Image (cartoon, coloured by chain):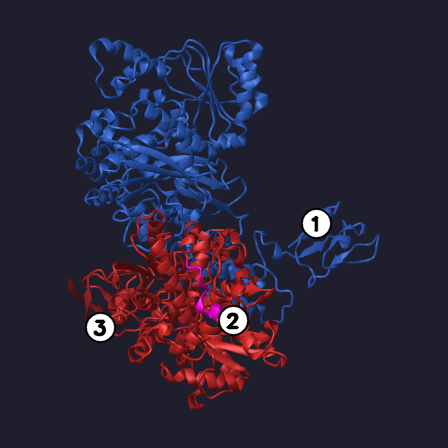
Chain colours: A red, B blue
């Protein structure tokens, strides 16, 4: 039902059931806000979005108040402006305000807001928050003194990620965001997906940075410095430098990283092809033996930790194959090291990835051999962009170069896994070939490219109707996991990614991207697939080459330990 | 009902007004016995509610029991509720066969023997006696006033408190004997849901929690929504500082609340009712639990009550004790097992409440009115109170009064009457202000005390009635200290969700603290800074009222604003002269040493934390004003009372 309301002496149309904020936004009236995010349920906590409604005693939080017919609203009356300004001043009164030293300087919603509202004087002084910095987590650092308690991390962790690591604790002016039993993050059930970092308006949540260590290591001449680039980075890093996403940026990044001092730059997609081959073989074998079906993907480290914590019964279903980044890490320190004749310890293996949980994955005991990690340093997209800035490289005008051999090229399947459902597409392509010896008739599967939370598809392969399910994000994970646990899910393969949309929206991606940006990033990955000729993993000639020599180079007994991993039940505070 | 036999059956028939002719005699006898019209042996009644427990009633009870054993006298001991005379507790009543029941005040353990020795031998120690109950069947005592002649009781309109202190709160029989559960039985057999809502609507009953929303309209809103499950919640989480009305009521007459809830739940069509109280109210919980169990045993709750097809389950939820959980949305969250934080409204709980189902939340006092309205009719209720505010209201009066008490007066009674009934301020002191409504209420100056207490008069004056806690201040109270207390309370009890309440309360407290303390280095700008603080206070207070999410934050600045309006001079004194007339603000005190009295023992100089006291031994010491922080250690250690402050 439509009706008209009056806003700032102008009539506008409103729909019944919308909030005031939605109506105003649709009509191009910008209302500042802090706690309200479109994808999350409103809480009405920050009160910055208040407007004046005639006939109401108090100001009204527009994010949660429904419009009604005949409302007369003033969005920028002196009363409203004063209230907003005082609210921001109150927030700033105990904020550490060390903006110059803050990672989010220039990209901070509190800073923007105080600028927009013209806060120019410190009228209200309070004691600056000095709270414990929680550095214990492998992925995420919590700086509670910068927290403005908007509750966005609480809601994103609970409503979108179904993890619920954070909750408000204490009350009154001592209210904080805390984890279970107020212990440090490493005791908590945090899966390290980093979605909270993306939603945090300030620097209260940020990643565990490895930049300092990397800069020192880069000057260690004894080491061969190897970095691998995740395909999802190509989609998004351009945002930081004003370069269009797509294929060309890979070459520019390769050139920049060589300049920075890396001896070898590889493409993670190569290993993704390898993972797809192994995974398809594993699926084929399980479908023959009908054991532990459905096979659940394990390339997402955040999901793996989630399963280890919450659904240990599902661990036998998880694919034994390592994730692409760690797979490349292990073959770099074995196959590649042997080829170029250096020791395992003399390789510095760096991963540039949009995934924050990789930082945790790289520290897993399963990912070390002889006490040496397969991956030494994990850089997020943000850190990579920062690295390029520190070294003063002009990404826009640098001459592109190709990644290094032998892990240079990949099929487009190896890049698709950056989008939710892409991994499944890749598996189906290779499985079809491995089962029937023919290429899959339709490569592009629209059902798996939708944005819905649970995607389902059936593909006839040989005599069997192969059913696949993709969980796009963890929002619906509980019903799905329970169905698998109770044996009610009639599917052969399940892909689960922790971040909605897949790795392109990972926790290490640039902060503050709009929905439009995200869509474009996903599209750029699909575009590569549409134009690429080599669409399936089994067609990768370089991969075939590596496979042929692999057991010879690394030794037959080592093959399993290099390619496969294992999982353990994890006890954490919930 | 078939399962219930014997005397219970008689009571049930009485409740249902189905007493047959042959039963009539037995019933009357039973009721008369339960009302203790005729008693065969002496009965000792001991008031035992939380307020009397604090005063020592448990010890009194123990000693009475010991007395009974030692003296080998045949006594019956009954624990009863509270009369509302909290500062006269423990109160012990004695009823001898054929004599009027007589109350004794402040019966501490050591007085028990004296009193009982006297009374049991028909000699009344009248110096301890408070009053006696009027009863035409009993012979009165000489020289003891009747309760209804005492001004304290005479000027009250005791409707909800009628049975408090009179009956045994742990006995459903007592309650039934005094007419209990008749309203519920009547409603459930003769009324439709709409008719109950209508009766309450017409009675003009308004929510007693502070908002004053018409109860009938609230009920009708929920009744009109179709849902497979509805909830009724009784908000028994009374936690305003200085408010103890509902707690005493629940401990003194729990069945009244249970009956009220049962009627209300029937009216809105809810078959699950929850009493939300707090874990700390141990006695309240025990009494309510007992009452619920007794009602279940008699078939007054449960499945298919009185074959009406109506089912009702009442359960108790013990909250952890957060002030904000008195706010209905926070209360609902707390019941759901979540963190008690208010949510935005709309949707209101009447449409989407507990577990997303339509829910009515009423407070205890509102519910306690319901059985009376049903029993006596809405016309009767309409006659009490003012034009728009009907009925009576409970008030707990505390602070600087001679008699801390709980009273019930018709709405429209002037505030001064409450102070008067509470015995006024202590002798030699002057009434300074009256704070009504706890941390969300205003302080009212003596000139305004004639304001009748009703929703409309308060609204026109811009006051908030609150739940009914009245705190009286005399001139030994510093108004800034009072405001600081409430602001500290809010700072501590705010849920921390919205910025204005969480940060605003902290910052306002900071400013108030700055006003009431001496800056260590006064460079001449101190006063200006503090004066700027006051302007800022007003600004923050306004934003807090305008933008806070729930009532807690919206009203949190009321004590401050009213204090600023009425006691501006006191603020100015604190700011410019750094002086607290009442002498409460420790940090503003400057100590002096009386040269005449000082012996030069140096005890104060040794203990002074800032070395502000100097001198030579055996000659008078003196205080360096600039260094003194007003901690008062010197005053404490001085054996010659030579240290004083201005």
Q: Position of residue B331 (x, y in %)?
A: 37, 46
Q: Is residue B455 left or right of residue A553?
A: left
Residue occupying the point 53% across, 58% down: A186
Q: Position of residue B344 (x, y in %)?
A: 33, 56
Q: Main secondary structure of the magenta part?
A: helix
Q: Chain of mark 1?
A: B
Depth order, front residue of A8/A237: A237
Q: Which residue is mark 1?
A: B635
Residue A9: which numbered mark, if any? Answer: 3
Marks 1/3 in contact by CB < 8 Å: the verdict is no
Q: Which residue is mark 2?
A: A552
Does residue A243 appear anywhere in the picture? Answer: no
Q: Secondary structure at mark 1?
A: helix
Q: Position of residue B159 (x, y in %)?
A: 33, 31
Q: Which residues are magenta?
A: A319-331
B301 shown above or below A410 = above
Does residue A569 appear anywhere in the picture? Answer: yes
Q: Position of residue A439 (x, y in %)?
A: 28, 71
């Amino acid at each position: 039902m439509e009706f008209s309301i009056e806003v700032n002496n102008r009539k506008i149309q409103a729909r019944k059931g919308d909030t005031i904020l939605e109506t105003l936004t649709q009509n191009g009236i910008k209302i500042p806000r802090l706690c309200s995010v479109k994808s999350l349920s409103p809480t009405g906590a920050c009160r910055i979005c208040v407007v004046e409604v005639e006939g109401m005693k108090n100001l009204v939080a527009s994010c949660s108040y429904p419009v009604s017919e005949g409302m007369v609203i003033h969005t920028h009356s002196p009363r409203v402006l004063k209230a907003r300004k005082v609210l921001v001043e109150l927030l700033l009164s105990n904020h550490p305000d060390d903006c110059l030293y803050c990672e989010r300087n220039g990209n901070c919603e509190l800073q923007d807001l105080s600028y927009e509202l013209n806060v120019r004087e410190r009228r209200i002084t309070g004691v600056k928050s000095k709270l414990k910095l929680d550095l214990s987590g492998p992925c995420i650092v919590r700086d509670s003194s910068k927290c403005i308690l908007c509750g966005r991390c609480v809601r994103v962790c609970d409503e979108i990620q179904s993890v619920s690591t954070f909750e408000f604790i204490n009350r009154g002016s001592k209210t904080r965001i805390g984890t279970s039993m107020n212990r440090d993050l490493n005791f908590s059930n945090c899966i390290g997906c980093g979605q909270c970092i993306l939603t945090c308006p300030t620097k209260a949540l940020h990643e565990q940075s490895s930049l300092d260590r990397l800069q020192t290591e880069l000057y260690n001449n004894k080491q061969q410095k190897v970095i691998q680039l995740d395909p999802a980075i190509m989609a998004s890093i351009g945002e930081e430098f004003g370069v269009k996403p797509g294929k060309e940026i890979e070459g520019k990044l390769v050139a920049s990283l060589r300049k920075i001092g890396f001896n070898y730059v590889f493409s993670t997609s190569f290993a993704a092809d390898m993972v797809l081959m192994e995974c398809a073989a594993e699926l084929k074998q399980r479908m023959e033996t009908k054991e532990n079906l459905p096979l659940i993907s394990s390339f997402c480290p955040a999901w793996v930790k989630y399963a280890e914590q919450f659904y240990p019964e599902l661990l036998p279903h998880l694919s034994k194959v390592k994730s692409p980044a760690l797979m490349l890490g292990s073959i770099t320190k074995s196959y590649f090291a042997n080829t170029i004749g250096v020791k395992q310890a003399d390789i510095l293996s760096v991963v540039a990835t949009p995934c924050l949980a990789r930082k945790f994955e790289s520290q897993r005991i399963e990912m070390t051999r002889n006490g040496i990690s397969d991956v030494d340093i994990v850089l997020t997209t943000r850190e990579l962009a920062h690295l390029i800035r520190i070294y003063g490289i002009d990404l826009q005008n640098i001459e592109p170069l190709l990644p290094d051999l032998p892990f240079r090229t990949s099929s487009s399947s190896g890049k698709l896994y950056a989008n939710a459902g892409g991994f499944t597409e890749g598996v189906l392509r290779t499985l079809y070939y491995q089962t029937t010896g023919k290429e899959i008739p339709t490569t592009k599967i629209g059902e798996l490219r939708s944005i819905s939370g649970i995607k389902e598809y059936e593909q006839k392969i040989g005599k069997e109707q192969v059913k696949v399910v993709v969980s796009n994000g963890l929002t619906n994970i509980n019903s799905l996991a329970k169905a698998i646990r109770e044996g009610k899910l009639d599917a052969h393969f399940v892909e689960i990614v922790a971040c909605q949309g897949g790795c392109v929206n990972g926790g290490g991606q640039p902060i503050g991207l709009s929905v439009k940006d995200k869509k474009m990033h996903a599209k750029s990955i699909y575009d590569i697939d549409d134009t690429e000729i080599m669409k399936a993993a089994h067609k990768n000639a370089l991969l075939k080459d590596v496979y042929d020599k692999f057991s010879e180079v690394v030794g037959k007994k080592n093959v399993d330990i290099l390619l496969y991993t294992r999982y353990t039940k994890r006890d954490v505070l919930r | 009902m078939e399962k219930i036999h014997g005397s219970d059956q008689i009571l049930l028939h009485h409740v249902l007004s189905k007493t047959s002719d042959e039963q009539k005699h037995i019933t009357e006898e039973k009721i008369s016995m339960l009302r203790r019209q005729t008693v065969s042996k002496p009965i000792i009644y001991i008031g035992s509610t939380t307020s009397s427990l604090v005063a020592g009633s448990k010890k009194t009870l123990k000693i009475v029991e010991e007395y009974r054993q030692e003296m080998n006298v045949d006594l019956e001991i009954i624990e009863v509720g509270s009369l509302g005379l909290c500062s006269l507790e423990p109160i012990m009543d004695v009823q001898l066969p054929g004599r009027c029941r007589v109350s004794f005040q402040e019966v501490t353990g050591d007085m028990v023997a004296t009193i009982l020795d006297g009374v049991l031998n028909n000699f009344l120690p009248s110096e301890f006696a408070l009053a006696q109950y009027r009863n035409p069947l009993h012979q009165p005592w000489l020289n003891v006033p009747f309760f209804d002649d005492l001004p304290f009781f005479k000027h009250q309109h005791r409707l909800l408190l009628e049975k408090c202190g009179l009956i045994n709160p742990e006995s459903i029989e007592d309650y039934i004997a005094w007419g209990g559960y008749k309203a519920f039985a009547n409603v459930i057999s003769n009324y439709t849901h709409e008719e109950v809502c209508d009766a309450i609507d017409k009675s003009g009953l308004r929510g007693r929690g502070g908002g004053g929303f018409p109860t009938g309209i609230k009920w009708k809103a929920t009744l009109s929504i179709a849902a497979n499950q509805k909830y009724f919640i009784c908000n028994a989480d009374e936690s305003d500082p200085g408010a103890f009305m509902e707690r005493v009521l629940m401990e003194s007459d729990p069945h009244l609340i249970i009956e009220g809830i049962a009627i209300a739940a029937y009216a809105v069509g809810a078959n699950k009712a929850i009493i939300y109280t707090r874990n700390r109210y141990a006695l309240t919980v025990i009494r309510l639990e007992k009452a619920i169990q007794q009602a279940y045993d008699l078939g007054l709750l449960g499945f298919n009550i009185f074959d009406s097809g109506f089912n009702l389950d009442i359960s108790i939820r013990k909250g952890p004790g957060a002030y904000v959980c008195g706010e209905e949305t926070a209360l609902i969250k707390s019941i759901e097992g979540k963190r008690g934080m208010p949510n935005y409204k709309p949707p209101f709980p009447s449409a989407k409440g507990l577990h997303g189902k339509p829910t009515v939340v009423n407070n205890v006092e509102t519910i306690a009115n319901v059985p009376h309205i049903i029993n006596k009719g809405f016309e009767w209720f309409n006659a009490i109170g003012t034009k728009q505010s009907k009925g009576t209201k409970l008030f707990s009066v505390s602070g600087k009064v001679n008699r801390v008490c709980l009273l019930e007066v018709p709405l429209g009674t002037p505030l001064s009457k409450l102070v008067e009934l509470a015995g006024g301020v202590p002798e030699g002191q002057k009434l300074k202000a009256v704070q009504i409504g706890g941390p969300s209420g205003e302080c009212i100056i003596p000139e305004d005390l004639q304001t009748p207490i009703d929703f409309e008069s308060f609204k026109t004056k811009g006051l908030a009635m609150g739940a009914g806690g009245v705190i009286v201040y005399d001139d030994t109270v510093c108004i800034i200290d009072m405001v600081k207390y409430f602001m500290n309370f809010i700072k501590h009890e705010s849920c921390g969700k919205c910025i204005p309440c969480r940060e605003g309360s902290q910052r306002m407290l900071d400013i108030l603290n700055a006003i009431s303390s001496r800056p260590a280095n006064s460079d001449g700008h101190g006063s200006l800074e503090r004066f700027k603080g006051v302007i800022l206070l007003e600004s923050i207070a306004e934003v807090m009222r305008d933008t806070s999410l729930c009532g807690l934050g919206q009203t949190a600045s009321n004590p401050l604003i009213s204090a600023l309006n009425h006691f501006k001079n006191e603020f100015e004194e604190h700011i410019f002269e750094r002086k607290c007339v009442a002498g409460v603000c420790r940090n503003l005190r400057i100590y002096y040493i009386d040269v005449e009295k000082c012996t030069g023992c140096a005890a104060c100089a040794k203990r002074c934390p800032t070395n502000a006291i100097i001198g030579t031994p055996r000659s008078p010491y003196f205080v360096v004003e600039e260094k003194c922080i007003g901690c008062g250690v010197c005053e404490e250690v001085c054996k010659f009372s030579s240290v004083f402050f201005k």
